């Protein structure tokens, strides 16, 4: 199953990015093979619709679960429709590595 | 992806309106009234839902203003303005023995979130997921955050 964690920087020591639509990077973790990759969020500087753009990206990647600090209403509506599980982490000092180890 | 680009177009061309503030649950009261005060109660202050939420997040849940503004989906200056207004209203009500009435304001409710009582993270449970467990710590001590409105 593919999980996305929003990341501030493209490495495992990075902190989670609190914003979904306007995060810096998406960290893609696939528990089928343990693979981790980082994808730059091209839509982070969009004038409007950053959340929708990011949600569309998640759908095209076939993601089943997203971990972030917060989700906007439009992104949430779309992701709910596609049965993608959303997780809001309340502790904003967690590294990507820590988050991955807790869902492995 | 055609459907998506169309819906995106629609969103961009929509006229800009004031960003509604996101709140998890409305206040559980309609009015607070002074009791045992001297003289007549002297009127009412109207506390907006978003003002109540700002006080709850910052002073009851103990979040930083940064965390609080992210949760409400607004900028930090906007949060600071709402929070300041909430505090002034409550102070005025206490000093001048006014009623505090909760008023809807400019908000929408963030629905369908579950909370893990063990690790405090929030999550959704789409129909495709059958086990009712916290996805982060696997605890079954989860509760639905009901926004009864
Ligand atoms: Zn948990």
Image (cartoon, rainbow, N blue to C red):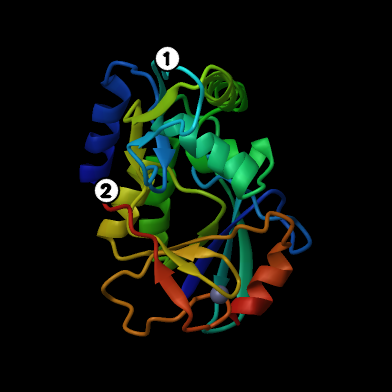
Q: Is residue A43 visible?
A: no
Is residue B62 or residue B74 the one in the foreground?
B62
Q: Above or below — where is B114 with respect to B64?
A: below
Q: Above or below — where is A89 with respect to A9?
A: below
According to the picture, the residue beneath numbered tag 2 turns out to be B1
Q: Which type of secondary structure does the marked residue at label 2 adopt?
A: loop
According to the picture, the residue beneath numbered tag 1 turns out to be B42
**At 66% across and 55% down in the image, what residue appears?**
A16
Q: Which corner quadrant of the image does residue A38 belong to? A: bottom right
Q: Above or below — where is A81 with respect to A98?
A: above
> What label sits on residue A53 in the rendered view?
none
Position in image of residue B111 (x %, y %): 33, 53
Q: Which type of secondary structure does the marked residue at label 1 adopt?
A: loop
Q: CA distance from mark 2 to mark 1?
A: 59 Å
Split into quadrants, the picture shows ligand 1 in the one at bottom right
Is residue A77 or residue B77 the one in the foreground?
B77
Label 2 neighbour load within 10 Å: few <14, some 14-19, many 20+: few
Q: Which corner quadrant of the image does residue B8 belong to? A: top left
Chain that bears disc 2: B
């Amino acid at each position: 199953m593919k999980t996305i964690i929003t990341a501030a920087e493209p490495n495992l020591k990075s902190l989670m990015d609190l914003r979904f639509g306007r995060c810096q990077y998406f960290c893609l973790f696939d528990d089928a093979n343990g693979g981790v990759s980082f994808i730059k969020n091209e839509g982070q500087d969009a004038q409007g619709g950053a959340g929708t753009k990011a949600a569309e990206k998640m759908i095209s990647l076939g993601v089943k679960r997203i971990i972030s600090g917060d989700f906007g209403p439009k992104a949430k509506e779309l992701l709910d429709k596609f049965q993608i599980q959303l997780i809001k982490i309340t502790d904003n000092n967690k590294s990507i590595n820590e988050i991955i180890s807790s869902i492995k | 992806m055609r459907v998506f680009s169309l819906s995106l177009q629609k969103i961009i061309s929509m006229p800009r309106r004031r960003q509604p503030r996101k709140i998890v649950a409305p206040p559980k009261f309609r009015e607070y009234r002074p009791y045992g005060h001297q003289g007549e109660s002297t009127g009412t202050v109207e506390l907006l839902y978003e003002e109540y939420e700002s006080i709850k997040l910052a002073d009851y849940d103990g979040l930083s203003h940064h965390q609080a503004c992210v949760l409400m989906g607004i900028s930090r200056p906007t949060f600071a303005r709402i929070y300041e207004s909430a505090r002034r209203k409550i102070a005025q009500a206490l000093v001048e023995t006014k009623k505090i009435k909760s008023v809807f304001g400019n908000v929408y409710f963030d629905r369908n979130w579950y909370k893990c009582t063990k690790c405090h993270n929030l999550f959704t449970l789409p129909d495709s997921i059958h086990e009712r467990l916290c996805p982060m710590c696997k605890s079954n001590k989860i509760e639905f955050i009901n926004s009864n409105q």
